[in-house]
């Protein structure tokens, strides 16, 4: 059953309040920016716990005989109470990480290892691992697949100035991780009352990626070159206290040594210009979060990307429809995300004498398990184990541009 208890702002940091939910008193407390809810009734002799004291370590002390309960688990930690209170599941409306109510550092680190399998003619390597064959024997076939192991350490560190509701941060946005976006961001987040939360960040790729100087060279070893991508991202979340978010992303793509088509003698210099991959990319995304029940959430999103490359045959309009399902339970949290879309390219490709268009499809699932032993690292919240898998398929009308990727990772996550 889903019940709206209160607006997030009704329970400030370090405060607990009692709400009557269809005849049941529920205590809601906010500790370190996170909400916790338990039944507001001591299991010893029925005192209201909300009349008691909020203690350090996410605990509450009963006003009558000083029993102590854990707000996260409901467990009775100190006598005379022995039975636990019930924990009430809460879902908050935030998609951007909420801004903590207290000044100080927060963050996460989520090291993981796994494997990936790629089919691409466009990307040479990622993180130093080869993703496509140096030597290609045909311009008309789909790429062969390459497999490799990977190790990733996504992290984020933030400092909050509570008095002005401002936060500066560096790292990977956890929401973007869920959606295949591994870029790093240095930015600032500002809460503006009922207007919502504004975030502005400088985007840069911390993961080294290389592409082929001339992807169309056949029967000889291709040489690689760096691909850099920098830009900015503006996000407006919880627009006028709704569950809507709009995000604009700009990226500049720079290929250090662009030689596309140089090996193909039948191309004119104008033709080669049409294959250039340097350029700008503009993306606009709109999403809305629906809380289906207290534990289940659906988030549809629509993304439009304008790829404005120096080469018209490489420029495109891309449309993606995305749906994210979230289950928030204890000890499991599950997130499943899928997208389907298409890309229309601007001009005829001079090698194939036709205009490229792609069908796009992807799914991604992540399962988090909060360890039952309460293990922590340097005063972190209880550690989580996670497993994640993703599949992305780009099916082009020109086989050479087909792409496929499969990622799987397992790891542990710590939050402060
Ligand atoms: S009523 Fe809570 S400890 Fe007695």
Image (cartoon, rainbow, N blue to C red):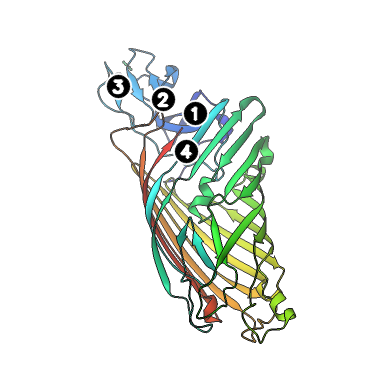
Label 1 SS: loop
Q: Is residue 339 left or right of residue 79?
A: right
Mark 4 packing: few (<14 Cα in 10 Å), some, or many (20+)?
A: some
What residue does disc 2 label? 58
Question: Residue 77, labelled with which disc?
Answer: 3
* Labels 1 and 2: the sequence-earlier one: 1
Q: Is residue 131 left or right of residue 43?
A: right
What residue does disc 1 label? 32
Name the residue furthest front: 220
Query: Closer to the camera, 154 or 196?
Result: 154
Task: Determine whether 67 is above or below 320 in the image.
Answer: above
* Labels 4 and 3: the sequence-earlier one: 3
* Labels 4 and 2: the sequence-earlier one: 2
Judge depth for marks 4 and 2 and give the one in front.
4
Percent position (x, y) of residue 66?
34, 13
Judge depth for marks 3 and 1 and give the one in front.
1
**Measured Cα–Cα span from mark 4 to mark 1:** 14 Å
Label 4 SS: strand
**Measured Cα–Cα span from mark 3 to mark 1:** 20 Å
Label 2 SS: loop
Write the residue at 57% across / 73% down.
215
**Quadrant of residue 313 within the rendered picture:** bottom right
**Measured Cα–Cα span from mark 3 to mark 2:** 12 Å
């Amino acid at each position: 059953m889903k019940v709206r208890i209160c607006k997030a702002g009704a329970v400030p940091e370090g405060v607990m309040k009692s709400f009557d939910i269809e005849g049941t008193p529920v205590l809601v407390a906010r500790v370190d920016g996170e909400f916790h809810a338990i039944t507001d009734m001591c299991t010893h002799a029925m005192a209201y716990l909300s009349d008691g004291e909020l203690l350090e370590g996410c605990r509450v002390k009963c006003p009558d005989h000083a029993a102590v309960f854990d707000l996260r688990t409901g467990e009775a930690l100190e006598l005379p109470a022995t039975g636990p209170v019930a924990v009430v599941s809460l879902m908050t409306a935030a998609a951007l990480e909420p801004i903590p109510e207290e000044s100080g550092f927060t963050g996460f680190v989520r090291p993981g290892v796994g494997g990936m399998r790629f089919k691409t003619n466009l990307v040479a390597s990622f993180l130093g691992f080869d993703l496509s064959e140096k030597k290609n024997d045909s311009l008309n076939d789909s790429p062969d697949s390459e497999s490799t192991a990977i190790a990733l350490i996504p992290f984020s560190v933030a400092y909050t100035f509570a008095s002005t509701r401002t936060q500066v941060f560096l790292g990977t946005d956890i929401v973007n991780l869920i959606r295949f976006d591994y870029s790093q961001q240095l930015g600032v987040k500002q809460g503006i009352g009922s207007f919502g939360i504004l975030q502005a960040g400088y985007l840069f790729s911390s993961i080294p990626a290389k592409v082929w100087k001339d992807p169309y060279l056949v029967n000889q070893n291709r040489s690689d070159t760096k691909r850099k991508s920098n830009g900015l991202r503006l996000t407006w979340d919880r627009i006028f206290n709704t569950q809507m978010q709009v995000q604009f992303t700009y990226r500049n793509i720079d290929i250090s040594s662009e030689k596309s088509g140089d090996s193909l003698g039948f191309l004119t210099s104008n033709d080669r210009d049409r294959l250039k991959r340097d350029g700008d990319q503009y993306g606009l995304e709109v999403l809305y979060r629906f809380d289906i029940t207290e534990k289940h959430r659906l988030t549809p999103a629509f993304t439009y990307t304008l790829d404005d490359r120096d080469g018209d045959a490489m420029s495109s309009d891309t449309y993606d429809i995305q749906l994210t399902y979230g289950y928030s339970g204890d000890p499991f949290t599950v997130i499943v995300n899928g997208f389907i879309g298409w890309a229309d390219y601007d001009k005829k490709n001079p090698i194939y004498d036709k205009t490229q268009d792609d069908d796009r499809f992807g799914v991604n699932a992540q399962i988090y398990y909060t360890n039952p032993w309460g293990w922590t690292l340097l005063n972190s919240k209880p550690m989580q184990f996670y497993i994640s898998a993703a599949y992305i398929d780009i099916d082009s009308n020109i086989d050479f541009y087909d792409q496929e990727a499969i990622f799987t990772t397992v790891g542990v996550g710590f939050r402060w």
